[in-house]
Each structure stands twice: as C-alpha cells, then as structure tokens.
Image (cartoon, rainbow, N blue to C red):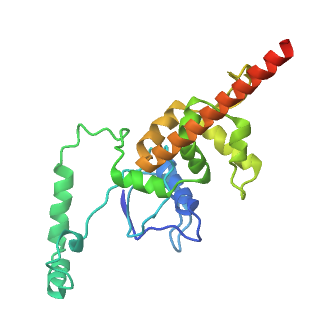
Amino acid sequence: MFSVLNEIRNYNNSKKGIATIIKSIISDESIRINEKNQPRRTTENVMNIIYISNAYSPVQLDTDDRRHLTRVCKTVHQVTEEHKEDVGYFTQLSQSYTQEFYENLLTFFLERDISQFNPTLIPMTEAKKQLIYVSRSLIDDVIIEHYEQFKQGIPIAFVNQCKPQNWKQITYKNAKQHKCTEQQPRINGKRTTVNVLNKDQQTYYDKIMNEEDIEASNANYQKYKKTIEDDRFVDQVAYDTKQK
C-alpha cells in the first residue's frame, strides 16, 4: 500500500506529536483498521508513506533517525519567475493531471530499476540535516555546545550545571543515557565520573553540525582545557606545599 500524507505538520506546539503517531505506522508489523460502520480489525502493516508539506518543520527527526529520506522540491516560482501569477498556465497544468497521466506515472515507477537500492542505507541529504537541526532537543543543544568535551569525556558535575531549567533531573539523566556512557578516568589525579558521547552518536552529530556550532564547541573546549590545566597547577602547588 502506498500512502501520501498531504500538508503534514506538527500540532499543539508538540514537536513529538506527529513523530510519535507516525512511528508506529512505519515500524509496527500490524495495524488497526477502524473503517466506518464496520467492525474494527487488525491486519498486516504494508504501508509505504510519503509526507508532503510546506511547513518548515513538518515532523521532528531525532539526530539518529534511520527511517526518513528527506528531499526539498522547488516550486515553479522558485525555478522561474516566468509563470508567477499566471492563472492560465496553472489552470492548464492542473488539467493535465488526467487518468492517463497517472497511469503513465505508475508505469514509470513500476519499470524503474531499483535493484541496486538498499533501503537500509538512507542518505543524509541537506534537507534532512536542516530538518534534524530545527528538531533539536534541549539535550542536543547541550551536546552541540560542548561537543568536543563530550567526545573526550566531560565531567558529569559540569554537565549537570548545563541542565535546562524546565527539565527535571531524572529527565535530563535519561536523555544523556540515551546518547552517552559513563566512565571514570583520572583527571588531575582524581577519579572523576564523566559522560562520553557514544561513537554512533558522534557520527550523527558530525553530519548535522554547522560551522558556527563547530567554532563555538572548539572555543568551549579550549576554555575547558585551560580550566583543567589551571586546576592541575593549583593541585601541584598544594601538594608541593604539603610536602614541605
């Protein structure tokens, strides 16, 4: 079954609203059909879906999304100014979408060679990067701002200082656990618990971060290194004084 969802967009100011609903439609092996005036029934889910939307953020995509291929299609106005506000042109265009047109379109799709296509290798298009970028959660913002530190290992005490004010601590912790692992290296001779961004997550963030994000992250990393170096110096002075 091939379904086209037209003018899809988020609702009720909930970024996750549409994504949560569609996720089950995409991934569930069965689907519940509630046909009007008929008993509800469950059947095999064989749906293939295309979303069409003019909204800048029609659905929220996670940084590690593996379900969506995203493309941007230019409108006639973006391609050329020749037919802008040309009612006759658009009337003729809409009338050309006849049954014969759709039959030819179906034939084109059915005869297209897709034998080399691997549906598990979904390309990261520029459109998808942009959609993921505007879908960023608050934990994504924290990680991107301190990306280099998260790759190397950032003390949990520092990460907790970055917690969004409107998030509960348990929510923040769960969000971190989805993307990071905890390790306990020695920093300045002290065993310190740190968050390290998972390798697979690093791959996703590398793809979506822009130049400004990278520059800000590098600047924060240099500040962090300076802090560590200063702490080491203070620790060394204190140790030497104690020895004397």
Residue 133 image position (x, y, % from top left): 47, 54
Q: How many marks?
A: 0
Q: In the figure, is residue 232 to the left or right of 54?
A: right
Nearer the observer, 99 or 43? 99
Residue 89 sits in quarter = bottom left
**Does any portion of residue 67 appear in the rendered image?**
no
Residue 130 image position (x, y, % from top left): 41, 55
Question: Against 232, is 170 above or below?
Answer: below
Nearer the observer, 20 or 216? 216
Residue 160 sits in quarter = top right
Q: In the figure, is residue 83 to the left or right of 227?
A: left
Q: Residue at x 53, y 66 (%)?
A: 34
Residue 32 image position (x, y, % from top left): 54, 58
Q: Residue at x 56, y 62 (%)?
A: 15
Q: In the figure, is residue 205 to the left or right of 122?
A: right
In the orientation shown, which residue stands out farthest toward the bottom?
87
